[in-house]
Image: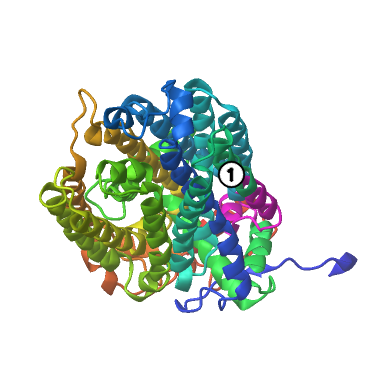
């Protein structure tokens, strides 16, 4: 060119639906695996509180009660935190995470996915400092709220980030890795709590809390060197940055056909969605998440409702009853000498069962394993409830019956860990179009934390033995089993099958199919073809408004 300039790279698309992504590389796996580390935050914060609430030193410090004489059964029974304190310290975290997830869904569109997660690590660290310094309920609750804000940032945007950079063939498996990291976090928390439970000083609860600083440092440091999501750059009209980010994620040069085809499809899909979803004011952009008819499978409001219900149903399986209040519940059974050890075993079952989903989520699909998992949990929880109100009653003192209850609780955890645990995160990362994706994922994740909060507020009263408590004991599993029936029906009627599709193909599938028939849908065209990017492309250095004008003109030809 005159002046020695270099011709700009022009992005063109393909009509071949099977050639929209580069071959999977080790680099893509490693990037996604590191991003999944954010699940450690979620899991560890879930895990340590349940154990700390049952620590003798923590109970004495927070209630002022003296250590009971082992022979005084009435004193031993009364030596615990009041249900109101258990409820407050457990549920207050969810208030922060609920707000954090919604705020993060907004921020991620302004400052980027990666920067939002790093900001979450910083907020989380401030909360940890307050929690560690606490010797009373007030400071502990303040720390829990601030930690919750950070966890809300991380839990929402890690899913968004992973879904946008993961190869379609293994997206379900790598996002399931997030749930695996949650289970590892719970296990690590229980191990640390188990090691410090008998300390007669503040180290009994401060050590488990302070360990969390390590997770924040590791994740924030690593994200400084990871690429931003290419779809975020497309949304911002920065095609050159998008091409560079996609090149790093896929391990291909910018001018390769793979990068050209995938980037063209992302651009074309985004422009197509912009025609369907008008860009209005700030409040209007939030309102877009609820536009359309609830009865249309591809409408924004239908996707948002599915995302909200998906996370709600995951919480209503009752799994966090076991992880939040398992130690207290196992103590109430009367025949278990070391409830901390039983809690550690249930956590280990959770960790070992989750990797099964890495294979099943891609082999059988999202819908099928959600339906199977929900059905399995219904059976296991009703069995636990039946044993608990017959041979497993505390008054009967039947060790064999209690052992059977624990065994079926472990089977229930296995069903959850291999199905609903990871799949709920996989689905919400896939069903939203790019213009509303970050807010949609944020709203869905906030639903998880809202119902998490509801459960942690009411559960101490449901199983508590104090005045005014329901004292359900093992009967609470009839409640969880009934709610799992609803979860299974929801998965059958409303959850679409997204296995093996790119995020852009998921958009097309939801336009042309219903949830119950979605597994049979096959991609037959590309957005690049529909929007005219297969013959004449768009330059990487084109301004955002010019990109939109160019593509709309090509689509009209």
* Residue 322 position in % (x across, y down): 32, 48
Residue at disc 1, secondary structure: helix
Q: Report crowding for label 1: few under 14, some 14 to 19, many 20 or more residues within 10 A (C-alpha).
A: many
**In this rendering, is residue 514 above or below 479?**
below
Q: Residue 92's quadrant in the figure?
A: top left
Label tally: 1
Q: Between residues 553 and 530, which one lies in front from this camera angle?
A: 530
Q: In this view, does 533 lie to the left or right of 461?
A: right
Q: Which residue lies furthest to the left in this view?
A: 390
* Residue 326 position in % (x across, y down): 33, 45
Residue name at image x 67 percent, y 58 percent? 226
Does the magenta portion include 220?
yes
Residue under pointer 1: 212
**In this rendering, is residue 322 above or below 204?**
below
Question: Dominant secondary structure of the magenta stretch?
Answer: helix
Residue name at image x 71 percent, y 56 percent? 225
Q: Is residue 482 left or right of residue 307?
A: left
Q: What stretch is highlighted in magenta?
A: 216-238
Q: Between residues 142 and 140, which one lies in front from this camera angle?
A: 140
* Residue 320 position in % (x across, y down): 34, 46
């Amino acid at each position: 060119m005159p002046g020695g300039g270099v011709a700009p790279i022009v992005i063109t698309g393909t009509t071949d639906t099977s050639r929209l992504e580069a071959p999977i590389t080790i680099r893509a796996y490693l990037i996604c695996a590191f991003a999944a580390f954010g699940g450690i935050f979620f899991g560890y914060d879930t895990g340590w509180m349940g154990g700390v609430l049952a620590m003798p030193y923590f109970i004495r410090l927070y209630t002022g009660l003296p250590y009971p004489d082992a022979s005084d059964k009435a004193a031993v029974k009364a030596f615990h935190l009041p249900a109101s304190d258990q409820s407050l310290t457990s549920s207050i975290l969810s208030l922060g995470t609920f707000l954090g997830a919604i705020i993060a869904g907004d921020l991620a569109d302004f400052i980027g996915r990666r920067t939002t997660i790093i900001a979450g690590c910083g907020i989380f660290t401030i909360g940890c400092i307050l929690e560690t310094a606490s010797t009373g309920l007030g400071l502990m609750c303040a720390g829990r709220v601030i930690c919750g804000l950070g966890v809300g940032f991380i839990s929402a945007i890690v899913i968004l980030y992973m879904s946008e950079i993961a190869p379609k063939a293994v997206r379900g498996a790598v996002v399931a890795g997030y749930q695996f990291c949650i289970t590892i976090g719970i296990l690590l928390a229980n191990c640390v709590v188990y090691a410090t439970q008998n300390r007669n000083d503040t180290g009994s609860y401060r050590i488990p809390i302070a360990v969390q600083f390590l997770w924040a440092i590791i994740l924030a440091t690593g994200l400084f060197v990871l690429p931003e999501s290419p779809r975020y750059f497309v949304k911002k009209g920065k095609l050159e940055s998008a091409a560079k980010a996609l090149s790093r994620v896929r391990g291909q040069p910018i001018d390769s056909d793979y990068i050209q085809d995938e980037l063209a499809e992302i651009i074309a899909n985004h422009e197509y969605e912009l025609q369907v979803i008008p860009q209005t004011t700030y409040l209007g952009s939030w309102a877009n998440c609820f536009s359309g008819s609830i009865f249309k499978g591809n409408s924004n409001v239908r996707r948002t409702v599915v995302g909200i219900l998906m996370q709600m149903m995951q919480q209503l399986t009752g799994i966090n009853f076991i992880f939040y209040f398992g130690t207290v519940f196992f103590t109430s059974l009367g025949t278990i000498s070391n409830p901390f050890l039983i809690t550690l075993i249930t956590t280990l079952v959770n960790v070992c069962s989750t990797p099964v989903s890495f294979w099943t989520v891609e082999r059988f699909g999202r819908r099928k394993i959600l339906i199977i998992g929900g059905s399995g949990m219904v059976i296991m929880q009703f069995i636990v409830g039946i044993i608990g109100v017959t041979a497993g009653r505390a008054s009967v003192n039947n060790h064999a019956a209690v052992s059977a209850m624990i065994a079926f609780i472990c089977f229930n955890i296995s069903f959850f860990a291999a199905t609903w645990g990871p799949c709920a995160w996989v689905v919400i990362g896939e069903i939203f179009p790019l213009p509303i994706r970050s807010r949609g994922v944020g709203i869905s994740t906030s639903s998880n934390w809202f119902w998490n909060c509801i459960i942690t507020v009411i559960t101490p009263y449901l199983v508590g033995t104090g005045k005014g408590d329901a004292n359900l004991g093992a009967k609470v599993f009839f409640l969880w089993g009934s709610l799992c029936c609803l979860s299974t029906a929801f998965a059958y009627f409303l959850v679409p099958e997204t296995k093996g599709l790119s995020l852009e193909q998921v958009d097309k599938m939801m336009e042309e199919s219903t949830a119950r028939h979605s597994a049979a849908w096959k991609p037959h065209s590309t957005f690049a073809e529909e929007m005219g990017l297969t013959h004449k492309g768009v330059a990487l250095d084109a301004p955002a408004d010019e990109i939109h004008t160019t593509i709309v003109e090509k689509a009209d030809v």
